[in-house]
Image (tube, grey):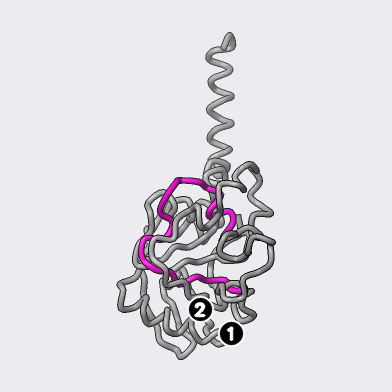
Amino acid sequence: MDKFEKLSGTAAPMPLINIDTDMIIPKLFLKTIKRSGLGVNLFDEMRYDDDRNEIPDFVLNKPAYRDAKIIVAGDNFGCGSSREHAPWAIKDFGISCVISTSFADIFFNNCFKNGILPIILPKEQVDILMEDAQNGANARIEIDLAAQTITSADGKVISFEVDAFKKQCLLEGLDDIGLTLKKSSAIDAFESAAATARPWV
């Protein structure tokens, strides 16, 4: 996956609490095992009416937020079923960071494995960023993962915590497969030694 070092982009405000994975990507779209192509169906039931027309009031349909790279969300984001399609859809849409006061555990961990940085902040700080995000195209946030800082459009700097191992994986662009491949030399050596020691296996 792509390395996550610094991210600068528009932040879309989604203050609704308990945004679950079925809202993020409805079960209708879980038939695919491809990570690409799901962005068009992100928040599908909130973005489109029954005739597949865009609902103008939905935040990601508004001109200022169509190219949002960050979501500032309400509490307990990503709750519900454990479908990995949820972070796939978020990433495919172009969003690489979600900021909230809390996340469902499985969704939280799936984000890191798919190149998305989920940031947990106290409510007071999320409220500040949520208010800033109301400013539309001017609501640009810069996230520096190495420094673990968020810089708002007016220059306010907020620090955040992140697990050191997960941070390093994002910085290096390593998912589970990438982590395994880093050990490919050791794996090859083990397999070679095992084949010599036990040729009958």
Please say whether residue 170 is one of the residues in the magenta stretch. Answer: no
x, y (%) of residue 107? Answer: 44, 52
- Mark 2, Cα crowd under 10 Å, few <14 / some 14-19 / many 20+, is some
Q: Label for residue 169? A: none
Dot 1 lies on which element? helix
Apparent side of residue 1 relative to residue 71 in the rendered image (left or right): right
- Look at the image and tell me in which quarter the C terminus lies: top right
Residue at image x 56%, y 56%?
A: 173
x, y (%) of residue 111? Answer: 49, 55
Look at the picture and state if 143 lies above or below 82: below
Looking at the image, is mark 1 or mark 2 nearer the viewer? 1
The residue most toward the top is: 200
Q: Which residues are magenta?
A: 67-91
- Look at the image and tell me in which quarter the N terminus lies: bottom right
Q: Nearer the viewer, residue 87 or 44?
A: 44
x, y (%) of residue 75? Answer: 36, 65
Q: Nearer the viewer, residue 138 or 56?
A: 56
Residue at image x 56%, y 72%?
A: 58
Mark toward the start of the polypeptide (1 vs 2): 1
Residue at image x 48%, y 51%?
A: 110
Q: Which image quadrant is residue 60 in?
A: bottom right
Residue behind mark 1:
137
Say if mark 1 contacts mark 2, CB within 8 Å: no
Amino acid residing under circle 1: Ala
